Image (cartoon, grey):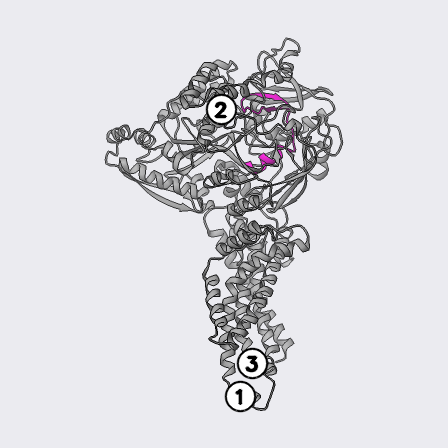
Amino acid sequence: MSRGRYILRRLVQMIPVLIGVTIIVFLMVHLIPGDPASAMLGDQATDVSVARVHKELGLDKPLYEQYFYFMRNLAELKLGDSIKFRVPVSSIIFERLQVSLLLVAITILLTIIISMPLGILAAIKKDSLLDNIVRSTLMVTMVMPSFWTGIILILLFSIHFRILPVSGYGSNPVQHVVHLILPALTISLGLAPILIRSLRTSILDTLRSDYIKTARAKGLEERSVMTIHVLRNALIPTVTLLGISVGFLMGGTVIIEKVFSLPGAGLLLIDSVSARDYPVVQAATLIFALLVILVNLATDIIYSFIDPRVRYG
Amino acid sequence: MSQPARAAPAPMKVSEEMGFDAQLQLLQHHFMAGHLNRRDFIKRASVMGFSMATISAALAACGGSSDKTATSASSGSTSSSGGASTTPTTSITVNQNASPVASGGATPTSSTSSGPSGGSVILARGTDSDNLDPVTNDGNVNIWLFMNIYDQLITVANDGLSLTPDIAEKWDTSTDGKTFTFHIRSGVKFFDGSDMTVDDIKWSLERAQKTESSPWLFTLEQVDTIDSPDDSTVVITLKEAWAPFLADISMFNSSIISKAFGTKIGEDKLVDQTMGTGPFQLKEWKKAQSMTLVKNPNYWKPGLPKLDQITIPVVTDSNSRILQLKGGQVDGIIGQNDIPLSAVTDLGNTPNTKVYKFTSTYNNFIVLNTRNAPLNDVKVRQALNYATDKNEIIKSLLFGNAEVSNSFMPNGALFWNPDQKGYPFDVDQAKKLIGESQSPNGFKLEFQVLSGNQLQLQTATALKDMWQAINVELDILQLEQGVMTDNYRNNKFQARLTGWTNDINDPDELVSYAILPESTQNYHTGWTNQKAIDLANEGRTTLDESKRKEIYYQIQQIHMDDAPFVYLYVLPYIDALNTKVEGFFHHPMGQWVFAEMSVKS
């Protein structure tokens, strides 16, 4: 099967998965106790005011009818209005999603910058001092909870040296990137050790294989051996790991968003669950599901570029 | 909320003597409210260990402002129209800017009258607003902010007790207490430059009175007609004499909104668009992220506001907020409960940062569900009150940042009884009462707390320890916000913490929540007392000040004796600001007062 047809088939397969997601999310948010009216009106809510809000929001209708309206809107690509903020969900969510996506992008970049050279060096200079330092130091940052790493980095770079902003997101693209360095670094420090270990191990495995011996025996430069033969083969498990991690990062950066006060989509989702802001919860979950599926697909496609032997069927 | 362009409200700096400061502040508050005379003030303050110099400075701070307020105060009561009484129902002659003035050495921390104009500040808070429509909104996150955008006819003075002119320069009350004539200030303009007219007032008040989705309709229930006989007069007639009326009309829902703007954009758009006559205007609102206010160049108070712009970002994590303040990224933290009490001392010791404690009406207590055994027994409820060591909770959990509460009404509020005994910590009395009750051997009690709220959990844990002395075993249940609120509303709880702040300076609002069962079944306690209900209704129609005071004192006594609550503490508003920011005031009714705020370059 060609790559194009494969991608198309995978995209079509997404549709039932996403419909499943809408049903599960819809049921979950509606079946947990508490409702938007209580969340909106607080402790001083009266029966009358709760009934009025229910009517306003259409929550007095049966569940299947509410689901039907939701799906009908979705088919017209309408996400509805936020209950809490009384504005269209799309106007909130896409802005917040940009923050999360930019954070994930910078995180991937930083993670690759950190883990590629260190992983390769650790493998080439196996059991050297450098190898041991890399492995032990990064073990520490890996097991440190991310909110803690984040606070330490803030204290160091923002309060002590004052070279990076404490938290927030800034107001123009340059500021956005500057504001995202520390949060991205925080996530990277947790992510990179896993990739470095995986890369190191698979490079070591590859180095032991026969075709490397052959390559060396035919007099190929060590540099070419590493780039053409070793790295390319050793990268596949690492790319898989990175793909899984990125899928997890979509919407999974809540703690980092909170520590660094980033107006990201993860935090929006959590806040919306507390406020029982059903339309936002539904839309955000759906978009996250979509992104995770797309990232997985992208990972599968990247395989075929790294390793031409990978075929789709 | 507008602020008189007079002396600086000088809040109190938190120092090592913080506990003392709070006490002195409380005394000043009572002194200004007339609960204490000068001699008692000096006597009590010296017993507390304050030096004579501090005491006299504190007294001067209370009294020093009275002459400055005389002009506007008397203007409110000298005019008269056709046989009408010239005495407003609520006295406005009490010191209007008797703000919680005091610091350790009783030196005002800043004098804003000389503060520079221009510049901008960034003030962080933990929770965003969700609705800026004065009529349909419900919550401090909104009210505290939009009181800087909208004005009212009259407003609560900085002491939190008296009423002072705002859009109305003065007002008259008819002798039967049913007709109120407001004389409107001339030359008031909206942000867009259009003139504010009696039409805008009539439209705004009628909207506040009739909008079905407003949770505040009860404040204007007694209003019969709103008329504007000429361009500078608004006459409001009531269905019957209603003592809290002037306080009610000063509430945020009676804000004056531009009629032209409201009808142009549609009333439902007022949730995130504003057009008022207040010192600031909403410029930009990124939902759940940040809000930007800009100066209203047409503001009617000369020389105000001082700042050109205020940005209010939402920083949900308390550590982040504090780090941003320390790192200079924001100039202050001002939201309700936004500064963990454990961080107050640390922030107070941080260079370039000051922590302020402002008098509030933020009363905290435990509500008891009195519908079922064992809490349907008054002796059990009284025993729980006696077994609660309020001072210990304040000392160890709140780091001394609160006062013991003795009533369902907040300390210092109008008609709050400072001499009511409350429930002193007395384990013997508690044991005696539980022994006489229907559950002499104690019982198990479920206590619901909000998950993730450290203070609630710590309080519950402390109570578990305290109540063990009378064999009450506390079963602490942590619940998520939505579930917690739902349980409460459906009366599915035995005991939980809650609190409230006054929205008006009249006791009627709190009394209707605590005594009259219609709205929330008395905070879902299910407790009712016919005598208290009769008194509460009588209080509303009694115009005589001293008789009203007597009535509300009686109500407080009944509530205390029947003990549907366990009174805990009154927490001040705690804000932290960079020292370059001056003139910020946190009003006892809760709103931030930005008009006189300035920033040193």
Q: In the shown orientation, is residue B461 left or right of residue A246?
A: left
The answer to which of B371 and B120 lies nearer the viewer is B120
Q: In the shown orientation, is residue B29 left or right of residue B378?
A: right
Q: In which quarter of the image is residue A219?
A: bottom right
Identified by mark 3, the residue type is: Val
* Same chain assignment for discs 3 and 1: yes
* Same chain assignment for discs 2 and 1: no
Pair 2/1: label in front = 1
Give the SS element for disc 2.
loop
- Is residue A237 in the magenta section? no
The answer to which of B233 and B310 lies nearer the viewer is B310
- Is residue B158 in the magenta section? yes
* Same chain assignment for discs 3 and 2: no
Q: In this view, does A234 lie above or below B563?
A: below
Q: Disc 2 and disc 1: Cα gap in Å?
A: 88 Å
Residue denoted by label 1:
A213
Residue denoted by label 3:
A230
Q: Quadrant of the C terminus of chain B?
A: top right
Identified by mark 2, the residue type is: Ala
Residue denoted by label 2:
B413
Give the SS element for disc 3.
helix
State which chain disc 3 sits on.
A
Give coordinates of residue B164: x percent, y percent: 61, 21
Q: Is residue A265 above or below residue B168?
A: below
Q: In which quarter of the image is residue B154?
A: top right
Q: Does the CB distance between marks 2 and 1 fall below 8 Å?
A: no
Q: In this rendering, does residue A279 appear at all?
A: no
Identified by mark 1, the residue type is: Lys
Q: In this rendering, does residue B27 appear at all?
A: yes
Q: Does the CB distance between marks 3 and 1 fall below 8 Å?
A: no
Segment colored magenta: B140-165
Q: In the shown orientation, is residue A254 left or right of residue B472?
A: right
